Amino acid sequence: MGADNPDPPTTRAPESYLWPILAMVAAILPQVLVPARLRVGPVPLVPLIELAAVAVMVVIAARPGPVPRGARPLVLTLFGVLVGANTVGAARLVSLVLDGHPVDGAALTANRLLVAGALALSTNMFTFGLLYWQVDGGGPWTRARGPAQRPDFQFPQTLDRELGGPDWIPHFGDYLYVAFTNLISFSPADTSPLTGRAKTLMALQSLIALAVIVVVLSRVINILPAPAG
């Protein structure tokens, strides 16, 4: 698989696009494999945009030699569109749940709502993890050349070099973990946003997750039958 251009020469191994591509596939598969009768969303446009992003990343990664620096704006744009599509899909889900009417002729059962909420939240995690990975400190190409001079996120390993070693830099898995913890706790865990854009993205991710969790779970609780006395 292709890797980000490490030029100028460095002893640090450049990061591969393999794991980000697998993360995109993991986000798409449930949306495709879950039966339509159990889905409320996302809108069909969301998985199509995700497939387009995967195709572009595969082309970049399969290219012989290092990944060109100029590929980052295209990937960053695609991830930005993914975040927008995820936001629209989540808003549509919340709107449909609040409306309360049958969708596609089928009632909004508890199972259907739980599946829809799980799909929206998993897409949220993967999408924002990918965007954090590309945004932070100029992207993986810049980070491969050395620690970012103006990082968007502050990891514990950058404060205490004994934790990760003197040459430690964050990789995709670190950003996916940031997205996961922000999703479930609505706040940073061990990694802090430093810039305005990082804070804005994390706030948007938390807002989307909070809206989906509160609206979907409250409706599920109302649908479930009360326990027999």
Image (cartoon, helix red, strand yellow):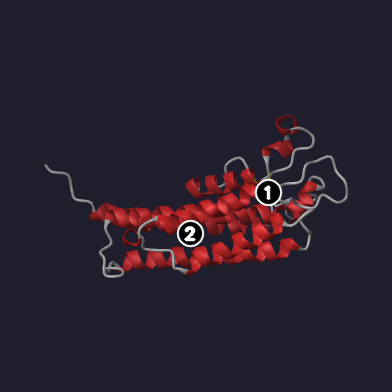
Viewer can see residue 210: no
* Rendered image: mark on residue 11: none
Name the side, left or right, on which 31 lies relative to 62: left
Q: Secondary structure at mark 1?
A: strand
Q: Which quadrant of the view contains residue 197? A: bottom right
Is there a contact, CB below 8 Å, between mark 2 and mark 1? no
Q: Quadrant of residue 81?
A: bottom right
Residue toward you, 138 or 153: 138
**Residue 99 placement (x, y as % from top left):** 31, 69
Q: Of all residues shown, which one is farthest toward the left?
A: 229
Residue that carries the numbered disc 2 in the rendered image: 208
Q: CA distance from mark 2 to mark 1?
A: 21 Å
Q: Residues within 10 Å of mark 2 (few under 14, many from 20)?
A: many
Badge 1 crowding class, 10 Å Cα cut-off, few under 14, some 14 to 19, many 20 or more, is many
x, y percent for residue 44: 45, 68
Amino acid carrying label 1: it is Phe
Horizontal side of residue 191 vs 66, given as left or right? left
What residue did someone put label 1 on?
153
Residue at 75% across / 56% down in the picture? 138
Is 96 left, or right, of 165 in this rendering? Answer: left
Q: Residue furthest top?
A: 162
Q: Specify the farthest residue to the right.
A: 8
Q: Position of residue 102 (x, y in %)?
A: 27, 68
Residue 130 in sight in this render? yes
Instruction: Give the amino acid at mark 2.
Output: Ile
Q: Image quadrant for the C terminus?
A: top left
Q: Residue at x 58, y 55 (%)?
A: 128
x then y, percent, for residue 134: 68, 55
Secondary structure beneath label 2:
helix
Q: Earlier in the sequence, mark 2 or mark 1?
A: 1
